[in-house]
Amino acid sequence: MAAQSLCCVIFLSLLKIDSICIIIYRWQIMALINISGKDPIIDINYRYKMPPLLCKVEGRGNGIKTVILNCLDIAKSLHRSVDEIRKFIGYNLCTQTRGKDNNVIVNGEFTRQDLQSQIFEYIDIFVLCECCRLPETIYRLGKNHVYHKCASCGHKSKIEHRLNKFIIKEYAINHVHKPKQKKIIATTIDNSEENIIWYTDLSEEAVAKRKTECPKIVFKY
């Protein structure tokens, strides 16, 4: 075993640094999965990636629960909030969920495949464009409706789901319009002669006063 480890170290030392970086990069890419809905996308060159769901079961009896360990990473890949994904899973599985330390706790025992299928269903409804099927959508909210606006093809579609009320409420909390405060600019008055702007008063009173104050000028020819 020690000989095999030594051979691996020697082999890696002979490789160039660029080759090692490429190997690490490909290993990271292979650890990710394609962002897809219910219909899987089998394409190794697909550029929209997300980490696979990781979970563990804790407790036993009535207190058994399933903890999703990387829900924050999944939410960042989908450009959605953790609470939104958590609520969707709770609605679909008819169970209570809560967040703790960037993890999602789901009451009950569920397998990784069960929870991963819920993530795919969420992506199909709330992330993918209805027209081009790319995960480049942003929300457009109405009074009681949620719409998709695709940044890729420009298609706009309406979402019908019970999660809409939560999305509208969450958006209202996170985007509260605060009143703008007026900026007060403090100014100082400089009375130095360099900053004084001189001008001539051309009113009749000023002209008459200057005539009396100024000495008479006698021109000699």
Image (cartoon, helix red, strand yellow):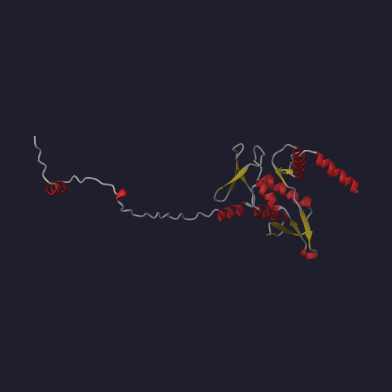
* Figure check: 2 above or below 26: below
Residue 33: image x %, image y %? 74, 44
Q: Residue shown at 31%/48% (left/top)?
A: 194
Quarter-of-image position of residue 42: top right
- How many numbered marks have been drawn onto this rendered protein structure? 0
Residue 61: image x %, image y %? 80, 65
Q: Is residue 109 visible?
A: no
Q: Residue furthest top?
A: 221
Q: Residue shown at 78%/65% (left/top)?
A: 62
Which quarter of the rendered picture does the C terminus lie within? top left
Q: Residue furthest front?
A: 221
Q: Is residue 122 visible?
A: yes
* Figure check: 138 above or below 191: above
Q: Nearer the viewer, residue 208 or 33?
A: 208
Q: Residue shown at 90%/49% (left/top)?
A: 2
Q: Nearer the viewer, residue 209 or 166?
A: 209
Q: Residue furthest bottom?
A: 62
Residue 163: image x %, image y %? 64, 52
